[in-house]
Amino acid sequence: MRVALLGGSFDPIHHGHLIVAMALREALGLDQIRLVPAGEQPFKTGHHRATAAQRADMVRLAVAGEPGLTIERAEVDRPGPSYTVETLRVLAAAEPGVGWSILLGADAARLFPTWRDPAGIKALAEVVVFARDGEAPPEGVADRVVAVPRVDVSSTEIRARVRAGRSIRFLVPDAVAGYIATHGLYRD
């Protein structure tokens, strides 16, 4: 079985995340992509607008019923900072025989050398860097580079639209929009 992890804040998850995930699943012939909401990102401490549990709920709603896409709660359920190498160690021990990949956008790949134990990550998983039109991934990080479509939507833009009372329809799955409204997220 071939499984890839796609981590992020997902604050909130949006259609851009999902389009890229599906494109990567097809391009790489993966059995599954697990979206991994960070519990507490070391590079974004204190910057998440929704709680880890709320972000995980939104990811769960976004991937419900999508074959090959699921949520991985390892980082949300583990206290303290979320380190990819720790997540991979836990998953590899629990699921021997799985071929793991880690999926990084070109922007995240540029920071990869500063992550906790990049060599340990590379020993546990294939590092796949996805690049959008015109993006050049950094050298020496990727085991493989895959082109994905550019979808110009961002979580920052979605939060700003909610705060301004504007529609987020078609930017996020309907279930995520409903969750945001029900829980009054991003209105401050």
Image (cartoon, rainbow, N blue to C red):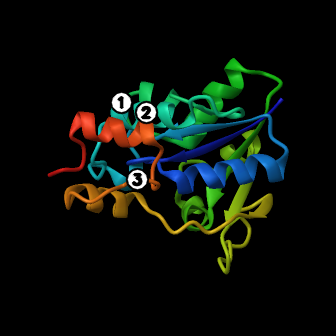
Relative to 167, is 92 above or below?
A: above
Residue drawn at point x = 47 percent, y = 64 percent: 153
Q: Which tag, 1 or 3, sits closer to the chain's start?
A: 1
Residue where numbered disc 1 is placed: 53
Question: Alpha-carbon distance for marks 2 and 1?
Answer: 5 Å
Height in image: 21 above or below 166?
Answer: above
Local secondary structure at mark 3? loop
Please give left or right for residue 39 compared with residue 30 in the image: left
Q: CA distance from mark 1 to mark 3?
A: 23 Å
* First along the sequence among labels 3 and 2: 2
Instruction: Pick out the residue farthest to the top.
Output: 94
Mark 3 is on which residue type?
A: Arg
- Residue 104, given in percent of the width and then of the height, sits at 63, 56
Q: Which residue is mark 2?
A: 56
Q: Dot 2: what SS?
A: helix
Q: Classify the position of the N terminus by image quarter.
A: top right
Report whether 44 appears left or right of 138.
left
Tell me how many marks there are.
3
